[in-house]
């Protein structure tokens, strides 16, 4: 899904730290000889359980899943990586 092609107003705000804060933490850790640990949620946007507040139609992946005909569109029931609101849906899932 290519969110940059979406031409509708979609609420996409989600809390993120600024780059300067990340750089300051890295500098402080290096100065104090601390060990930093990072984590990433695998397929985080797909794990968000909230429903979309809009209809999102998409072309199915290749090879086609069982029961999907060539040229048929599918409707996304949840967040998809690449859409403008995916980050917000993940944040709401965590709250």
Image (tube, rainbow, N blue to C red):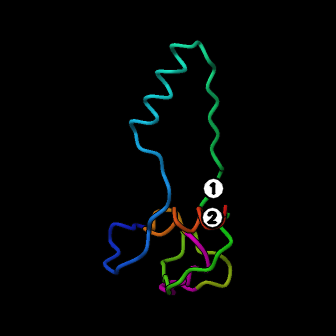
Q: Secondary structure at mark 1?
A: loop
- Of 89 and 16, nearer the camera is 16
Decide: is 77 above or below 20: below
- Whether the residues at callouts 1 and 2 have beta carbons within 8 Å, the answer is yes
Q: Residue at x 67, y 84 (%)?
A: 67
Splitting the image into 4 quarters, where does residue 8 fall?
bottom left
Report crowding for label 1: few under 14, some 14 to 19, many 20 or more residues within 10 A (C-alpha): few
Report crowding for label 2: few under 14, some 14 to 19, many 20 or more residues within 10 A (C-alpha): some
Identify the image quadrant of the C terminus: bottom right
- Expressed as whole percent of the image width and height from the top left, the position of residue 71 reads 47, 85
- Expressed as whole percent of the image width and height from the top left, the position of residue 94 reads 67, 61
Main secondary structure along the magenta-highlighted residues = loop
Q: Which residues are magenta?
A: 69-79
Q: Residue at x 57, y 71 (%)?
A: 79
Task: Based on the picture, tell me whether residue 75 belongs to the magenta stretch.
Answer: yes
The image's mark for residue 22 is none
- Of 80 and 88, nearer the camera is 88
Q: Which residue is mark 1?
A: 43
Q: Secondary structure at mark 2?
A: helix
Identify the image quadrant of the N terminus: bottom left
- Of 42 and 27, nearer the camera is 27
Decide: is 13 above or below 57: above
Task: Based on the picture, tell me whether residue 9 belongs to the magenta stretch.
Answer: no
- Expressed as whole percent of the image width and height from the top left, the position of residue 25 reads 50, 28
Give me the C-alpha separation between circle 1 and circle 2.
Answer: 5 Å
Q: Residue at x 63, y 64 (%)?
A: 46
- Of 24 and 51, nearer the camera is 24
Q: Which residue is mark 2?
A: 46
Splitting the image into 4 quarters, where does residue 45 fall?
bottom right
- Expressed as whole percent of the image width and height from the top left, the position of residue 92 reads 61, 67
Q: Residue at x 62, y 80 (%)?
A: 51
């Amino acid at each position: 899904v290519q969110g940059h092609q979406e031409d509708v107003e979609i609420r996409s705000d989600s809390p993120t730290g600024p780059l300067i804060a990340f750089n300051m933490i890295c500098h402080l850790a290096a100065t104090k000889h601390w060990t930093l640990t990072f984590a990433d949620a695998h397929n985080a946007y797909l794990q968000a359980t909230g429903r979309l507040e809009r209809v999102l139609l998409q072309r199915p992946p290749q090879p086609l899943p069982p029961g999907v005909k060539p040229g048929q569109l599918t409707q996304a029931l949840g967040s998809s990586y690449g859409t403008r609101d995916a980050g917000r849906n993940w944040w709401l899932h965590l709250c």
